[in-house]
Amino acid sequence: MVDAPSAADTARLLLDVSEAGGRGAAATVVAGPADCLGLRLVRLDEGERARTVGSLGTDLDPAVLSLLDEAISDTRARDGLRTPAGHDDVEVYVEVRRPVRELIVVGAGHIAQPMAHIGALLGYRVIVLDDRPDFATRERFPEAHRLVRADFSDPFADIALHERSHILLVTRGHKYDYECLIRALRTTPAPAYIGMIGSRRRVRATYVQLLDEGIDRARIDRIHAPVGLDIGAETPEEIAISVAAELVLLDRGGSGGMLRDVERVAERFFNTDPSEGGAP
Amino acid sequence: MTHEDDKTLADALIEARDAGRACALATIVATKGSTPRKVGARMLVDPQVGLVGTVGGGCGEAEVIEAAQRVLVSGEAVRVRVDLTEDFTTWSPAVCGGVMDVFVERVSGSSG
């Protein structure tokens, strides 16, 4: 393996581990001794084992490795600058990569099409799954990474689910949604998102059934059903946008309200004294 | 950066390395206030191909490109602070109200 990973090596290593469903982090020295600037240390967690590529010198390595392991294990860790413990004069830029985000659309019907489209736009690797080969076709889903023909009684048999899997249940029948939901809920590690379409009544009936099956309350609370943000969506395209908005919100945070109402720029402006920069 | 951005950049980096071409890589490592792109955004300045990726466009990016040209010559990495807080009334596209730190390093070519 490469001794001193270049920017290209590092990019490749992180990309590969992410596509294989693993995790990785890399540190680049951006402040410190001149001969260290731009040096990289990469840590890869491929499930069974972790490996290290490169070195910043025996002095720095342990402190930086612990930063990298921390970033890998903290699912909320963001890319950014860190100072290795005991090296106040050094700054490293840490980038973290997780399994590539996947959107698994179960049911290749009329909502699935705009959903696959928007999912791909948002950078999800989209997998569309149906039991009918005529529906999950390349013509209907040009942006899908994979089209899977699956039996709804064991829908994820050919898909490796992980903590960055986002599952949207939009099959043609509520019974199928339910069967897939049970499977999704029993997956470990838990998927990032499980959404199921359905009216209030149908969702309620599903929850009653889940409790009967022995699924506990904590798991049920994680289900997003009905799916999406409340934007009054009616058409399949609008529903897909509402679900996409929910995915963005869960990823980035936010209130889901209109920014105008959140920031109240106009209101604050007109109610502020002109001497403080408000309206004259 | 999205996974697709990552892929595009990795491909560009690898292509330049395999061709033995020196390029400059700019990475936003810190931001304060409102900036068009956030931490992690990258731009490769490849003298042959041009720009791959963006650190936000406008005047701020122009500053980074200038730094990249210096880094390509000197081979020494620099950290550039780009200030996007100039007067709002200029309507300049670079006015976002924030400040960003960009690490610019030479990659591939003679530096490996």
Image (cartoon, rainbow, N blue to C red):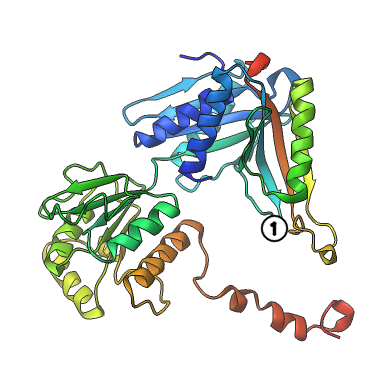
In the rendered image, is residue B20 in sight? yes
Badge 1 element: loop
Q: Residue at 84% of width from left, 84% of height from top?
A: A273
Question: Where residue A64 sits: x, y (%)?
Answer: 58, 28
| Residue in the image at 52% along x and 26% along y | A10
- Residue A176 at what x, y percent from top left? 13, 62
Neighbours of disc 1 within 10 Å: few (<14), some (14-19), many (20+): some
- Camera-side residue of A137 and A108: A137
Would residue A122 appear left or right of A219 to someone viewing this image? right
**Is A234 drawn above or below residue A217 in the view shown?**
below
Name the image quarter holding the C terminus of chain A: bottom right
In which quarter of the view is residue B61 placed? top right
Residue A86 shows in this picture: no
For image coordinates 50% across by 33% down, the residue present is: A25
Residue A219 left/right relative to A40 = left
Give the farthest residue toward the right. A275
Q: Where is residue B95 in the image (x, y as percent from the top left)?
A: 77, 58
Amino acid type indicated by mark 1: Ser
